[in-house]
């Protein structure tokens, strides 16, 4: 049992490595990852104080830079470098997860619907990323975040953990996940 | 020929560089300190009286600006809130010069303790300092108020404690610390009780964080809401809109 678990862990780490490296396999994938990372960061930071963000953008959409800058500083002042690093890491992982999920969807389209189980972990990774952003937004009122354990950093760590878990489950989106554990 | 499908050294370097620039940029924006750091003391300050048409209890509250100004700005704040400090240092000075000192609007400071464990005690300190100087030297309240915000540390709320607020009180000219301490001992619970109803008004207006503002035209009853440290232009636009409504 312990041996199986160790092997599964090794597989997961290898698959995670493959998943994280996938955006580096073409210029277009790298670009998609960069754009999604940037967009996710903006959404995450703006969702840390949604009322303020909505008002600023409704008054003048060109003030988005002001809002992102002001709230980046707010996240740092409330949660320190750790909080800021977690938000940035969340954005990068979301960029990778969405790029990989796009590849999985394309693959699934070319094949039959039976591959959906293999595609699932990758989609969950992307879904988890966007859901995580939503959760952060819903709870993202400055006061509410401050009331959460470690000023909300625990929630962010949980989101990042889920992202890594599902990215590791999906592996490189170009390969089939026919290992023993998945039953795919 | 660009090894499509493989991880190339060039792409790995670009990605690594982009991650470094992204992380460095975020860290730089987050940790740079405010260069402006201005400090506003209104030309006139008065103690409020009665409850307004918007249901805000102004009795004895510190209000910047003239008593008969047509627009009320209810400003819910917390001494532990970094975003409030940004409003105080970057927006309030210009807002004060162009709307409060001119008699167009008045700004009532209302506590909304919501950031940390010391938010409520900090609000009580503020109220007791105001009680002590309201009649004799209202400018001292604004000096204390700015000094309290200036104490905010680079991150977190651990800086806020008894010793810090005692030191700010001690060092502010015109504020008698022993009188403030007496007020804290004797009136703390009644001050806390009086903070709640006004926080309730903010919540009813769906202000869920600080700083929060309601702009209220006392003649027409028109009201607007701003949440967060908006740039000065947004305040100016909102005040003018409420004035004309």
Image (cartoon, rainbow, N blue to C red):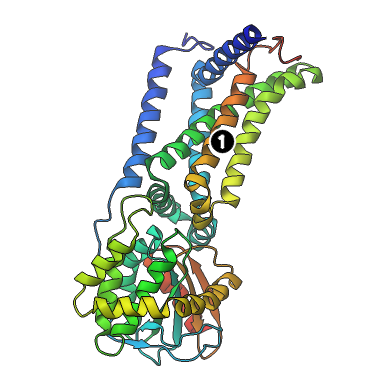
- Can residue B40 be spotted in the picture? no
Chain for disc number 1: A
Residue B173: quadrant of the picture: bottom left
Residue sitting nearer the eye, B227 or A7: A7
Residue appearing at x 55%, y 12% in the figure: A14
- Can residue A140 be spotted in the picture? yes
Residue B220: quadrant of the picture: bottom right
Residue appearing at x 37%, y 41% in the figure: A81
The image shows residue A27, relative to residue B142, as above or below, that is: above
Residue B239, x across and y down, in percent: 45, 77
Residue A43, x across and y down, in percent: 53, 45
Residue sitting nearer the eye, A26 or A71: A71
The image shows residue A164, relative to residue B198, as above or below, that is: above
At label 1, counting other C-alpha atoms closer than 10 Å, the crowd grade (few under 14, some 14-19, many 20 or more) is few
How many numbered circles does the render carry?
Answer: 1
Residue B44, x across and y down, in percent: 29, 86
Residue B213, x across and y down, in percent: 47, 72
**Dot 1 lies on which element?**
helix
Residue sitting nearer the eye, B119 or B103: B119
Q: Which residue is mark 1?
A: A158
The image shows residue A46, relative to residue B209, as above or below, that is: above
Q: Quadrant of the C terminus of chain B?
A: bottom right
The image shows residue A52, relative to residue B245, as above or below, that is: above
Q: Is residue B40 left or right of residue B56?
A: left
Residue appearing at x 52%, y 44% in the figure: A44
Residue appearing at x 52%, y 88% in the figure: B52
Q: Is residue B131 left or right of residue A181?
A: left
Residue sitting nearer the eye, A173 or A77: A77
């Amino acid at each position: 049992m312990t041996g199986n678990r160790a092997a599964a862990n090794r597989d997961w780490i290898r698959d995670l490595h493959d998943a994280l490296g996938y955006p580096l396999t073409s210029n277009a994938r790298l670009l998609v990852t960069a754009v999604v990372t940037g967009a996710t960061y903006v959404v995450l930071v703006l969702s840390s104080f949604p009322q303020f963000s909505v008002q600023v953008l409704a008054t003048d959409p060109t003030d988005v830079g002001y809002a992102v800058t002001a709230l980046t500083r707010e996240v740092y002042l409330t949660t320190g470098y750790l909080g800021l690093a977690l938000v940035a890491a969340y954005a990068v992982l979301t960029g990778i997860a969405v790029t990989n999920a796009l590849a999985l969807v394309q693959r699934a389209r070319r094949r039959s619907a039976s591959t959906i189980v293999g595609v699932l972990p990758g989609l969950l990774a992307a879904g988890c990323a966007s859901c995580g952003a939503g959760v952060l937004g819903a709870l993202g009122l400055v006061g509410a975040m401050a009331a959460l354990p470690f000023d909300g950093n625990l929630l962010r760590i949980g989101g990042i953990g889920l992202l890594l878990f599902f990215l590791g489950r999906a592996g490189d989106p170009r390969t089939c996940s026919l290992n023993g554990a998945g039953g795919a | 020929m660009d090894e499509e499908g493989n991880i190339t050294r060039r792409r790995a370097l670009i990605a690594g560089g982009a991650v470094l620039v992204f992380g460095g940029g975020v860290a730089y924006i987050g940790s740079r300190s405010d260069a402006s750091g201005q400090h506003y003391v209104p030309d006139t300050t008065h103690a409020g009286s009665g409850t307004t048409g918007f249901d805000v209890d102004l009795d004895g509250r510190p209000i910047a600006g003239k008593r008969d100004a047509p627009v009320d700005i209810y400003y819910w704040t917390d001494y532990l809130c970094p975003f409030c400090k940004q409003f105080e240092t970057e927006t309030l000075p210009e807002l004060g010069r162009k709307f409060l000192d001119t008699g167009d609007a008045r700004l009532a400071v209302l506590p909304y303790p919501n950031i940390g464990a010391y938010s409520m005690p900090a609000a009580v300190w503020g109220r007791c300092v105001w009680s002590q100087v309201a009649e004799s030297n209202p400018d001292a309240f604004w000096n204390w108020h700015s000094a309290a915000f200036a104490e905010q540390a680079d991150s977190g709320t651990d800086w806020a404690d008894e010793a810090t607020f005692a030191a700010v009180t001690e060092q502010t000219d015109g504020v008698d610390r022993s009188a403030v301490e007496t007020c804290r001992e004797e009136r703390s619970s009644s001050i806390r009780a009086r903070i709640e109803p006004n926080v309730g008004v903010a919540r009813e207006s769906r202000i869920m964080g600080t700083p929060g503002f309601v702009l209220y035209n006392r003649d027409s009853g028109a009201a607007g809401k701003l949440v967060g440290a908006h740039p000065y232009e947004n305040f100016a636009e909102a005040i003018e809109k409420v004035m004309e409504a």
